[in-house]
Amino acid sequence: MSAFFLFWSTILEKDQLQLQLSDRKINFAQAYPIFDSEGDLIARIGAEKFFMTEDLEFADIKRREFGLRKD
């Protein structure tokens, strides 16, 4: 994997995704490791469809490249 994509956090609850400070709001996201070709797939099918794919396990550092599959 040679890239990463910032998207919704899977480790925070919905009410924890933002932090309101006195002068600004901070929005939290999660960095997901991806292969270069998966970036093209995300652009084609959309981030939500890509990241909600049930058989895509981002915690598995030996996972196969999802970008080579047909959608």
Image (cartoon, rainbow, N blue to C red):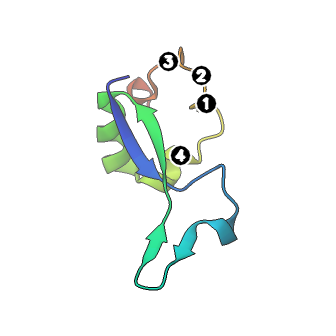
Q: Classify mark 1: residues with Cα within 10 Å, few (<14), some (14-19) or many (20+).
A: few
Tell me the distance, in whole angstroms, between the alpha carbons under discs 4 and 3.
15 Å
Q: Earlier in the sequence, mark 4 or mark 3?
A: 4
**Apparent side of residue 26 relative to residue 43 in the rendered image (left or right):** right
**Apparent side of residue 47 relative to residue 37 in the rendered image (left or right):** right
Nearer to the camera, 35 or 13: 13
Q: Classify mark 3: residues with Cα within 10 Å, few (<14), some (14-19) or many (20+).
A: few
Nearer to the camera, 26 or 53: 26
x 59%, y 48%: residue: 52
Q: Count all numbered tags in the image, as a single digit.
A: 4
x 53%, y 46%: residue: 51
- SS assignment at label 2: loop
User: Measured along the vertical axis of the image, is residue 4 above or below residue 45?
Assistant: above
- SS assignment at label 3: loop
Q: Which residue is mark 2?
A: 60
Q: Earlier in the sequence, mark 3 or mark 1?
A: 1
x 39%, y 24%: residue: 68
Nearer to the camera, 52 or 16: 16
Q: Which residue is mark 3?
A: 64
- SS assignment at label 1: loop
Q: Which residue is mark 1?
A: 57
Nearer to the camera, 66 or 70: 66
Q: Quadrant of residue 36?
A: top left
Rendering coords of residue 11 (x, y %): 66, 49
Kind of residue sitting beneath label 4? Phe
Inspect this view and state whether residue 4 appears: yes
User: Measured along the vertical axis of the image, is residue 12 above or below residue 50?
Assistant: below
Tell me the distance, in whole angstroms, between the alpha carbons under discs 3 and 2.
9 Å
Cβ–Cβ below 8 Å for labels 3 and 2? no
Q: Classify mark 4: residues with Cα within 10 Å, few (<14), some (14-19) or many (20+).
A: some
x 50%, y 18%: residue: 64
Q: Which residue is mark 4?
A: 51
